[in-house]
Amino acid sequence: MKVAWQDHLECTPNILRGKPRIKGMRIPVSLILGYLAAGNNPEQIIAEFPDLRSKQITACFDYARELSDGL
């Protein structure tokens, strides 16, 4: 399921030094991708961060895919 990552992620210069993060949270995209790379599934990540939603995790995937394609 593809989602528009722009609806779920943001970069704000004065929060997390401008690193991309989940909108309205201080959870960086890199943290979510790190959990996924370590073999955790979305359900395990949500158990660790109960305020997250599966669409936000999917948005991290889509963001990473677009970055690898050169945006």
Image (cartoon, rainbow, N blue to C red):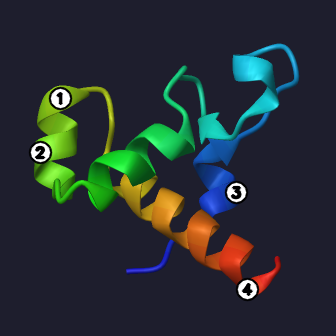
The quadrant in which residue 28 appears is top right
Q: Which of disc 4 and disc 3 is earlier in sequence?
A: 3
Q: Which residue is mark 2?
A: 44
Q: Which residue is mark 4?
A: 69
**Percent position of residue 35, x then y:** 30, 47
Task: Find residue 48 and name its label.
Answer: 1
Q: Which residue is mark 3?
A: 6
The quadrant in which residue 10 appears is top right
Residue type, numbered disc 1 = Glu
Q: What is the distance, in whole Å, between disc 3 and disc 1 at their CAs? A: 23 Å
Which residue reaches farthest bottom? 69
Residue type, numbered disc 2 = Gln
Circles 2 and 1, Cβ within 8 Å, touching? The answer is yes
For the point 74% across and 16% down, which residue is it? 15
Q: Nearer the viewer, mark 3 or mark 4?
A: 4
For the point 44% across and 38% down, which residue is it? 31
Residue type, numbered disc 3 = Gln
Q: What is the distance, in whole Å, between disc 2 and disc 3 at their CAs? A: 24 Å
Q: Which of disc 2 and disc 4 is earlier in sequence?
A: 2
Taking the image as shown, residue 57 lies to the left or right of residue 42, namely: right
**Percent position of residue 3, x then y:** 52, 70
Circles 1 and 4, Cβ within 8 Å, touching? The answer is no
Q: Tag 3's secondary structure?
A: helix
Q: Tag 2's secondary structure?
A: helix
Taking the image as shown, residue 62 lies to the left or right of residue 69, namely: left
Q: Tag 4's secondary structure?
A: helix
Q: What is the distance, in whole Å, between disc 3 and disc 4 at their CAs? A: 16 Å
Which residue reaches farthest right? 13
